[in-house]
Image (cartoon, grey):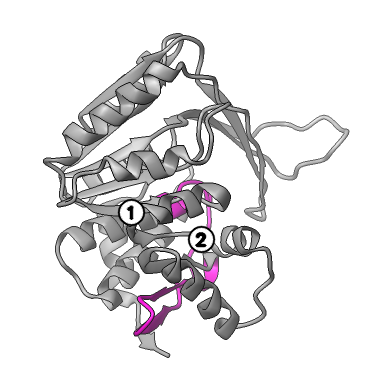
């Protein structure tokens, strides 16, 4: 089983426009609502690949029932820690050039006893999980150090994947992480410097490895991804596809990497699977995940090179 932990769920309102004109009236061509969150997206991707997923994390009373129905529709079992209030709403505006503009809400607050309740749930569920994925932001008022605390309660037999940035990433690394998946922008902001080439990227990845990660999977968006364990470095270029939305692409990458990690795959296959899933995800607009057929088609067409 692959356990995914979402601490900051969101209602994602994806709006398709011809163009986003600031200060003017904009006409919506298409709109979809997704009851989501990074780790919840990962769980859907895991299920799409035919692996067993289980979702947990914080949820809110006012509109949380819609998230339950979405998980049931996706075939993902779940158990949430419930809080008063309402799940935040994020707005994602996508124009005809596939340019994405995001307006993200701030997550609600949770009581101290709810933090302890989630830690207890993670301890129990991870004891029967091959892989535990914790990704995304934190509720308002929760310190970044909570990432360290919840990874420390993960069962030692469960492999650990983190997908977050900044102080939250550093906190997670203190607990020891098997795989961390930043994107290029996140890693640059986390380390406080710009990368000019692959050598700079690898130096950044090595700093993350030195802080407590075993593998770094660095997403480069449409340019593919890099994976390294400090000894072996591989690059996989993505293929050209019609981009409908980049929403959820990173989560698709994490889902495929988690399944491959569960299967004991080597670095090249983890990388190729991640790029295939991320690429397959961007071909969809009305969903935040990929189809297995699209994933498999792209996977077969990708090449991995060592550098």
Tell me the residue that label 2 is attached to: 242
Front in this rendered view, residue 155 or 89: 155
Determine whether 1 is above or below 173 in the image.
Answer: above
Q: Residue furthest left?
A: 128
Q: Which region of the structure is painted magenta?
A: 222-251
Foreground label between 2 and 1: 1
Q: Residue furthest right?
A: 23
* Left or right for 299, reference 262: right
- Marks 2,1: beta carbons within 8 A: no
Q: What residue sits 45% from the left and 53% below the top?
A: 249
Q: Mark 2 to mark 1: distance in Å? A: 29 Å
Determine whether 200 is above or below 209 in the image.
Answer: below
Front in this rendered view, residue 233 or 115: 115
Tell me the residue that label 1 is attached to: 161
Q: What residue sits 36% from the left and 14% below the top?
A: 65
Magenta segment includes 242? yes
* Left or right for 209, reference 1: right
The spot of residue 228 in percent (x, y) is 38, 76
Mark 2 element type: loop
Q: Residues within 10 Å of mark 2 (few under 14, many from 20)?
A: few
Determine whether 199 is above or below 254 in the image.
Answer: below
Front in this rendered view, residue 97 or 174: 174
Residue 70 visible in the current orientation: no
- Give the mark, 2 or 1, whose residue is nearer the N terminus: 1
* Left or right for 165, reference 266: right
Magenta segment includes 249? yes
């Amino acid at each position: 089983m692959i356990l995914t932990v979402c601490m900051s769920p969101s209602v994602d309102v994806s709006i398709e426009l011809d163009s986003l004109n600031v200060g003017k009236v904009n006409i919506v061509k298409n709109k979809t609502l997704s009851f989501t969150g990074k780790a919840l997206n990962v769980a859907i991707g895991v299920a799409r690949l035919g692996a067993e997923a289980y979702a947990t994390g914080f949820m809110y009373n006012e509109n949380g029932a819609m998230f339950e129905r979405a998980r049931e529709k996706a075939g993902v079992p779940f158990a949430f820690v419930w809080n008063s209030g309402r799940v935040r709403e994020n707005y994602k505006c996508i124009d005809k050039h596939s340019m994405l503009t995001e307006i993200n809400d701030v997550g609600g607050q949770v009581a101290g006893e709810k933090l302890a309740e989630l830690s207890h749930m993670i301890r129990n569920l991870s004891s029967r999980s091959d892989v535990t994925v914790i990704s995304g932001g934190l509720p308002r008022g929760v310190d970044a150090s909570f990432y360290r605390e919840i990874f420390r309660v993960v069962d030692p037999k469960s492999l650990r994947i983190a997908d977050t940035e900044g102080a939250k990433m550093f906190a997670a690394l203190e607990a020891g992480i098997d795989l961390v998946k930043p994107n290029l922008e996140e890693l640059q902001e986390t380390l406080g410097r710009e990368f000019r080439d692959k050598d700079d990227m690898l130096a950044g990845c090595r700093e993350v490895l030195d802080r407590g990660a075993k593998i770094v999977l660095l997403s480069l968006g449409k340019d593919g991804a890099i994976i390294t364990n400090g000894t072996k470095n591989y690059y996989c270029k993505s293929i050209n596809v019609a981009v409908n939305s980049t929403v959820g692409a990173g989560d698709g990458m994490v889902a495929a990497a988690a399944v491959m990690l569960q299967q004991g795959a080597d670095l090249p296959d983890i990388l190729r699977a991640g790029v295939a899933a991320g690429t397959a995800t961007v071909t969809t607009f009305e969903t935040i995940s990929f189809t297995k057929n699209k994933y498999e088609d792209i996977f077969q067409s990708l090449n991995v090179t060592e550098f």
